[in-house]
Image (spheres, helix red, strand yellow):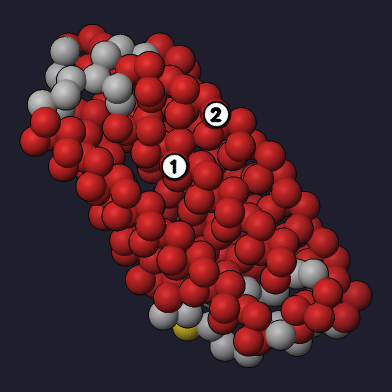
């Protein structure tokens, strides 16, 4: 699934599907965006609270990612509302805003990870964080795939890349789960910031692709 999300092509013209069919997919895109927004705010609260309690940069970064994903969801809702429904200019602007959110996430997580390594602050065990990561690892790819399919039907790179943020959340969940478990069971405190640093690199790559207008796929 990750390979499918990576195989992208530059955005062309907006979809020329029949108006009724396009409106149906636009409604679906808004519904998926609102569903993601609701969950990401819950996710943000749990991750931030658990991260602060455990001094875990991976958990705090996960919470920051959730907040940025919610913001990206609002961008998609904005894109498919009112006069922007058929605007290529709005589509391009949405791509750039979502790309910027990737860059913000990468910069924040990267800086905090370096601070954790240099400062030698060791995170403590967080079973709440482990449970959250275990839940989001299998669920986020499903949401990402649904958004990718709708975005491809609409030829909307912004929608596909917003789904890519959900896939990034799944990557982060896997890294978070491994890092938290290694810290809890083996005492490897460095696994927590190491996982966060890897996710920062992935976020940077996704941001570059979105800024260039890449994100719609063949065969969807």
Question: Image point 24% across, 20% down: which residue?
Answer: 123
Which image quadrant is residue 216 in?
bottom right
Q: Residue at x 83, y 74 (%)?
A: 82
Relative depth, front residue between 50 and 201: 50
Q: Does residue 200 appear in the picture of this structure?
A: yes
Q: Is residue 14 left or right of residue 86?
A: left
- What's the residue at 32%, 54% (across, down)? 106
Residue 92 to residue 111: above or below: below
In which quarter of the view is residue 127 placed? top left
Quadrant of image for the C terminus: bottom right
Measure how far apart labels 2 and 1 are at the Cα level: 10 Å
Residue 64 badge: 1
| Residue with the most extreme right position | 20
Mark yes or no: residue 4 visible: no
Q: Is residue 14 above or below residue 70?
A: below
Q: Could you tell whether 201 is left or right of 77 in the image?
A: left
Q: Which residue is mark 2?
A: 45
Q: Position of residue 164 (x, y in %)?
A: 49, 57
Q: Position of residue 67 (x, y in %)?
A: 53, 44
Please determine whether, in this image, residue 159 is positioned above or below residue 20: above
Could you tell which of marks 2 and 1 lies nearer the N-terminus?
2
């Amino acid at each position: 699934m990750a390979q499918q999300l990576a195989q992208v092509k530059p955005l062309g013209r907006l979809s020329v599907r029949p108006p009724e069919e396009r409106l149906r997919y636009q409604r679906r895109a808004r519904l998926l965006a609102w569903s993601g927004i609701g969950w990401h705010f819950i996710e943000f609260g749990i991750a931030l609270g658990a991260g602060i309690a455990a001094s875990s940069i991976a958990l705090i970064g996960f919470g920051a990612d959730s907040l940025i994903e919610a913001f990206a969801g609002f961008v998609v809702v904005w894109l498919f509302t009112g006069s922007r429904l058929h605007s290529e200019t709005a589509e391009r602007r949405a791509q750039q805003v979502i790309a910027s959110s990737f860059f913000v996430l990468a910069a924040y997580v990267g800086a905090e990870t370096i601070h954790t390594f240099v400062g030698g602050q060791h995170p403590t065990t967080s079973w709440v964080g482990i449970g959250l990561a275990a839940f989001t690892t299998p669920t986020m790819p499903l949401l990402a795939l649904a958004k990718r399919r709708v975005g491809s039907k609409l030829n909307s790179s912004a929608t596909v890349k917003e789904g890519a943020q959900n896939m990034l959340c799944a990557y982060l969940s896997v890294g978070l789960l491994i890092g938290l478990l290694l810290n809890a069971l083996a005492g490897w405190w460095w696994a927590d910031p190491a996982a966060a640093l890897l996710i920062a690199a992935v976020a940077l790559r996704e941001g570059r692709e979105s800024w260039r207008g890449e994100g719609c796929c063949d065969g969807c």
